[in-house]
Amino acid sequence: MRQRRRSAGTVRDGAPLPALDRALAAVGRLAVRRRGAVLLLAACLAALCAVLGHSVSTRLVNGGFVPGSAPSARAHADMASFGGGAPDLVLLARTSASVDGTAERRAGLRLVSRLRADGGVRDVDSYWTGELPRSPSGRAGGGGPASLLRQELRSADGHTALVLVRLRGGATEARGTLARLIPEATGSQGPLTVRVTGQAAALEDLQEQSQQDLRTAETVAAPAVLLLLLWAFGSLWAALLPLAVGGLAVAGATAVLTALTTVTPVSVFALNLTTAVGLAMAVDYSLFLVVRYRQERAAGTPHDEALARMMRYGGRTVAVSAAVVGAALTGLLIFPLYFLRSLAWAGLAVVALAAAGALFAVPAALSLLGAERAGRDWFARRRHRGAPEEGRWFRLACAVMRRPVLVTAAAVVFLGTLALPFHGVHFGLSDERVLPRSAPVVQAARSLRAGFPAVAGSEIDVVLPHWRGETPAGRRELDVYARRLSALPGAHGVRTTTGLYAEGRRVLACPAPSRAPVVQRATCADLLGRHTSTTGTWVAVSGPNAPYGVASIRLVHAVRGTAAPVAARPAGPAAELADLKKVLVERMPYAATFVVLITLLLLALFTRSVFLPAKALVMNTLSLTATLGGMVWIFQDGHLRALVGHFTVTGTTDLLTPVVAMCLAFGLSMDYEVLLLSCIGEARLGGRDTVRATAVGLQSAAPLFVASAAVVVVVLLALVFAGITVIKLIGVTVALSLVIDALLIRPVLVPAVMALAGPANWWWPLGRRAAAHAGVAVPGPATASDNGSQVPAALDRRGPGGAG
């Protein structure tokens, strides 16, 4: 017993094991010794987490794109006192007769009254009533149809009128309000037929459609994923391991998200990220361990010893990979957006649970199965079984390293060409056009744009806080400011208490004289009642039709640059996008620096090299840049729609969706890099030179990361059946990144660069003893005379016994 314990804490040459290896060995011993209890505990934990997180989808919200401290967010809050701002819901009430008919007017007033009575509604504008007063009596007020502002809410043919609804509270409260309002306020309303659109309605449909699309994708991908898992793992029992680990990780992460919803809003996309990352990490980590076990068994290592060595070598790769991926996700916490922060928490939870599940459940399950069933591989004859030097990946690496300069230059040029479209990217935010064209919200929005261009166009709401131009001097100052705004490029018109403006001149003056036409008097009364409050003065600037288009962003920057009576606060979609861009630009250097430094530190300790971590980051940067170029070429420019499913080309790329895609792609790429470096390091420890160590390492690692990438790519490509453009974008973008990484970066560019670096690959300023005490086990420089007893015999005599 003493001998057994002593050997568990040392390597074969008597040197002490690093701290990480000792911890993994202890985990392995515990999992094997208490295998039944470990598996039962894992099953109970998964069931408990599933129960706790079963209602998580009802608690998630679709928002969190603008920080609450942004100027546009404060201005949006100020707009509540004016009863203005972009409406959350737009109701299109259509009749075959005229909206001015008696029956139609009564039906419209009844509809507005029901909306006004709902506690979740802040205010309502309509063609029939104007702005309703916010009083308990609920009596209608405002300028009436004679006002020019009210006339904009009636179509030219007189068959359609608009009702604009603004909601109270944040995204969570709005979900409950929408669930009540939309069924009650749409459909047949007496002589009126009511349809709904608007940002809140689009977000609600987006959330429901995304859940439906994910279920469809899972159904489509399930058969192919199962077949790929059977091929990769070689038996049904082994193929069920990643599904079990993934189920545990996803269930645990949903419980974590449920707990988070009690203290902070959590984005609905966090659940989507949890499912994708959970499956990917579970497949990777389970595959690493199972293949390592089979390598040891094929080399003649006894069952129990094979499990111990599996935990030392494969477990180390799992632990370091989880740490690197977690570090990348932690960078999202630097951004003050709960959309990105909830993605970070979801990703951290699922990665940690996938790693822990694999490290405990896989050795316990293999021990329980026994040597015969655990080592069974139905496709063993079809895999490479000879020496590593006889494998096709070994031959590919050697061919690449014979001409490293040519290969590196060609690969970089190819990746640079793929990245070129990213130079023309125009970022925006998603609107209803990301939904299928057949969606009722999209059809209603199309009718709104066609019949009500003044309402459908984007608007920049400028709040002049605590300033009211009531004196003659104040009105003159406000008049000059409004004229300047109306003359800005892209501004279609301006309205405020002093009148209506267009192209630098006032087209309707307020206050109106007593003998002015009734339309002018009604319009001025409407403007005075709506554009002043205790908060200050509201100036509305009508802009281009596309709220997130380039012209709208230029206009909001021009508005902010125009001299105002007091410090102005622009609100509206374009202002929110401008603030979001500003926040991302300000925080991005800090997030990038944090991720780079942590990743470099972890990889440096893992590889005992300065060059290899820097090389890994450069490789990932090239891969991600090329992927972003492909994303813009496909989704912003509208190519390959026949292959990825038809979608509406808006000419912009959603600003935050690529962040989600790049997080997934970066994490998976680093996962494969850690595996490859681990295999190369072990081969180097055996005394091979750089070229042969790289080739042997690729022969060992490539079948694993190619099999893992194939499983994840199948799942992601199933998302092309989704009806939502952003879901398509995430699936296709991450799949493209994995294809580039698995077929070009790791097997071609990495060997070429390592051949060029030569001895620089292994330079490490610290001594071997210091690295060992730090918990590092991957070797630094080695020579032919180094003791190679630590290298698994399986690696020296044959290729991997796992995925081929």
Image: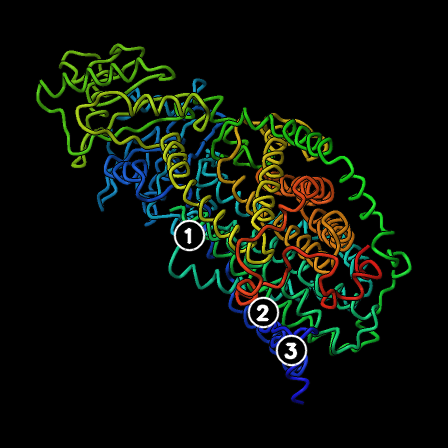
Q: Nearer the viewer, residue 511 or 709?
A: 709
Q: Position of residue 402 (x, y in %)?
A: 78, 38
Give the residue at x 23% y 16%: 520
Residue tagged 2: 18
Q: Earlier in the sequence, mark 2 or mark 3?
A: 2
Q: Which residue is mark 1?
A: 176
**The residue tagged with tag 3: helix, strand or loop?**
helix
In the rendered image, residue 48, in percent from the top left (x then y), is placed at 55, 72
Crowd band around label 2 with a 10 angstrom C-alpha radius: few (<14), some (14–19), many (20+): some
Image quadrant where residue 243 sits = bottom right
Label 3 to label 1: alpha-carbon separation: 46 Å
Q: Nearer the viewer, mark 3 or mark 1?
A: 3
Lower position in the chain sequence, tag 1 or tag 2: 2
Calculate the distance from the C-alpha at mark 1 to the C-alpha at mark 2: 54 Å
Q: Nearer the viewer, residue 587 or 765?
A: 765
**Residue 222 visible within the image:** no
